[in-house]
Image (spheres, grey):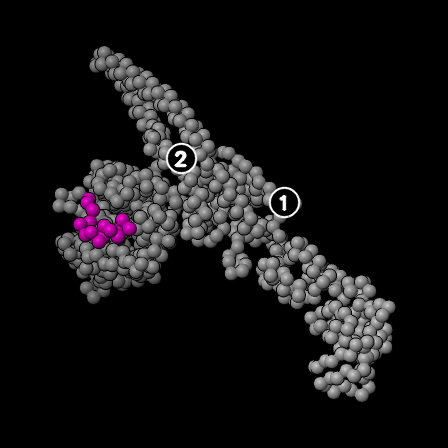
Amino acid sequence: MTHEAHQKVKASHLKRNAYLYVRQSTLRQVLENTESTQRQYALRQHAAALGWPLDRIIVIDTDLGQSGASAADREGFQRLVTEVSLGRAGIVLGLEVSRLARNSMDWHRLLEICALADTLILDEDGVYDPAHFNDRLLLGLKGTMSEAELHVLRARLQGGIRNKARRGELFVRPPMGFVYGADGKLILDPDQQVQQSVRLLFETFRRTGSAMATVKHFGEQSLQFPRRVHTGPNKGDVVWAGLEHSRVLRILHNPRYTGAFVYGRTHTRKTVEGDWVIEDVPREEWEVLIRGAHTGYIDWEEYEQNQRHLRDNCQAYGEDRRQSPPREGPALLQGLLMICGRCGKRMTVRYHSRRGQLVPDYVCQREGIEHGEPICQHLPGAAIDESIGNILVEAVTPITLEVALAVQQELQSRLDEADRLRQQQVERARYEAELARRRYLRVDPDNRLVADSLEADWNGKLKLLAEAQQVCEQQRAQDRKLLDEEQHAAILSLATDFPQIWRAPGTPDRERKRMVRLLLEDVTLIRGDHLTLHIRFKGGAHRTLQLPLPQRSWEQRQTSSEVVAAIDRLLDDYTYPEVAAVLNSQGLQSGEGLPFTARIVARIQRSYQLTPRYDRLRKAGMLTVEEMAQVLGIHPQRVKIWNRHGLIRGHAYNGKNDCLYEHPGANPPRKAQGVKFSKRVPANVVVPQCAKEVQCEA
């Protein structure tokens, strides 16, 4: 050591411990770069030469294999800072600044603590006192250079990676279903079971339109999905397990399944807490996207369609919630944009059970949920769904399809005209670029001022030409092609196929909802004196429907007016049980769909305030049993007996055979003699005597 170094070391420093900090960035460096590790441990001899005994030279080497970019995960560095702050360290030894820290914040914090605690710092170049300005300035420069060195190394590595990625040659861990061939090209996995599993996943999502439905299908069929092990002793092996929802989403969002090479889809960012966060990057900000780089499982158009499906599905849980995926429920407008005609907010679907079946209700309750206000609108959805279905069946007719095809042909002709105009723009840009090239070639090369200006103009014209060609090609790809005769006939066949498919009992509710989405844009619902439906079709056409208000529950169970009128007529001649029998023989049912009974007829008579049969008979002049007994001068019990034997005429007014009797007129029956009864007649009962002897047996 130099004399200057010995002058900086004082007795107060030697009374404290010397701390040697040893670090390597990775475990691979620990195993392979052993020379650097030995050089760091050799610094103990430097401390011994300065006067520290070996037993007071403490080595901190718990950070071997840890990066110096941050102190968050380095326990050894944190221990070193603690010891310095407690005044236990007289000197800190490190091979170079980069071993202690590659982060300016961590390095300057250590310098500040060392200056306050009067702790020296030693590296291969000498001994420094952070309390002295010159030494601290030099240490600060070394820390800055150490951090810049890490940035330069990282930038150099990232530059090579990006350059290789632009050519599509960067080795990226292949997703499940792909492997690298012997020539380094990405190919489909040779395992046919793996290929079939991946294809089945895309086919199931294509059919169901839902990632969760895809997972359920694999679970119902007891199917497993492959997963490749990337770490551990079984690295590279394929393991089969149940399909997970997160795995389905990763596969559907991965554009490599289309055969495209992609780089820069995610961005890694460090948070204030020291954690690393991976963020998705929008597609327009991807660094590299090369379509058709290798064989894929789906094409790019299907990938775009899958992304739209997933985006629509997740909108059911977002802030906007304008749409949601079609579910299994019977509500036809579920998932479609239903707008409340009063407040303009999106309506939701609720279900209730009626006679063992789910019946939808459309409810506007956003304000009720958020602010505790009453529900804005509540509309039973059965009648609305039926009307929407009828409109769709009416819309898909041969006439409407012919009109749509004619409009399509007209639009195609306009698209062709627009394409010719874009081609002219490309030709003009090509001419201007060629003109700028000729101007540049004619200029004297030694006249650099003019040559540079003409070269910049040429480059600008070439850029405009490339942009015009790109716009023309993209727009041409988006324009629809003319329909051939076969496609024309297939579209016209929808006029007969669509109603059959729509009304087929086996058509799932989910498929009907998808048909609705293909034809309708949104529906606005208003409830007033009647239901008003404003229906907007795809393309801008609209239609307004007015429906009667749906009946309440008690109204739906109400007996029809025709049946009530029939009961009113039958009560003139029949009792309650007899009326029920007549109605049942005619195939009529109550409002609840049940066969009639005497109790139901009586309830209807009371509910609708029909005149009871008793009152009808009394109004017709019928006599009660007491009144009839007084007219005939007999006991009331005799009246019932005479009625059974036809001597007088009685009319029953209830199911117990209680009767009212017709007036006997001017010649009533007289008391009869010699009438024999098999049953004993009470002594106080007078036996009737008629003009003709009556023999009767009970």
Question: How far apart, in angstroms, are the residues tagged by discs 1 and 2?
Answer: 36 Å
Q: Which residue is mark 1?
A: 530
Residue at (80, 71) in percent of width and height: 624
Judge whether 586 appears above or below 536 on screen. Answer: below
Q: Is residue 453 left or right of residue 55?
A: right
Q: How many marks?
A: 2
Q: Which residues are magenta?
A: 186-200
395 or 428, which is in the foreground? 395
215 or 469, which is in the foreground? 215
Q: Which residue is mark 2?
A: 492
Which residue type does callout 2 highlight? Leu
Q: Is residue 62 magenta?
A: no
Q: Which picture quadrant has residue 658?
A: bottom right
Residue 263 in view (yes/no):
no
Rendered location of residue 71, percent (x, y)? 31, 54
53 or 144, which is in the foreground? 144
Tell me the crowding category of disc 2: few under 14, some 14 to 19, or many 20 or more residues within 10 angstroms, Cα based.
some
Which element is circle 2 on?
A: helix
